[in-house]
Image (tube, rainbow, N blue to C red):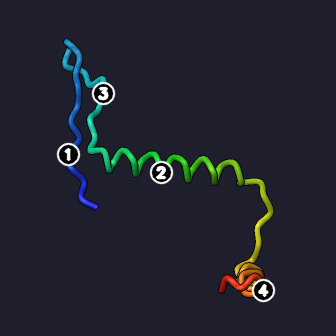
Amino acid sequence: MEHKVARYIVDEKGERTSVILPLNEYKEMLEDLHDLAIIAERREEPTVSFEKLKQKLKKDGLL
């Protein structure tokens, strides 16, 4: 992915107050934030070993 330089909006003191990003980068950031929120929500759920997951996928005809 090609990153373009972010542009900033500054106040009368020259301090950055906002950022302008290319739309595709903004959308990717939103997707990343969504993924992180899901991970945080599911942190306490029990884990499944890779082997058990493969067995279940095979049993369900998905692998």
Q: Quadrant of the N terminus?
A: bottom left
| Side of 41 relative to 26 (left or right) | right
Q: Are marks 4 and 2 in contact (CB under 8 Å)?
A: no
Query: At label 2, which amino acid type do we have?
Result: Glu
Q: Position of residue 2 (x, y in %)?
A: 24, 59
Q: Quadrant of the C terminus?
A: bottom right
- Report how far apart the C-alphas of labels 2 and 1 lie in the structure: 20 Å
Q: Amino acid at mark 1?
A: Val
Q: Residue furthest top?
A: 12
Q: Is residue 13 left or right of residue 46?
A: left
Tell me the tag on residue 19: none
Mark in the foreground, 2 or 1: 2
Label 4 packing within 10 angstroms: few (<14), some (14-19), many (20+):
few
The image quadrant of residue 8 is top left
**Residue 38 coordinates in the image, percent (x, y):** 63, 51
Q: Quadrant of residue 51?
A: bottom right
Label 2 vs label 3: CA separation?
20 Å
Please report the residue visible at 42 percent of the width from the left and 47 percent of the height from the top: 29
Dot 2 falls on a residue whose secondary structure is: helix
Residue to which mark 1 is pinned = 5
Say whether disc 4 or disc 2 marks the residue closer to the N-terminus: 2
| Label 1 crowd bin: few (<14), some (14–19), many (20+), radius 10 Å | few
Q: From the viewer's perspective, is residue 19 above or below residue 36?
A: above
The kind of secondary structure element at disc 3 is strand
Mark on residue 31?
A: 2
Say the numbered circle drawn on residue 18. Answer: 3
- Name the residue that disc number 4 marks: 59
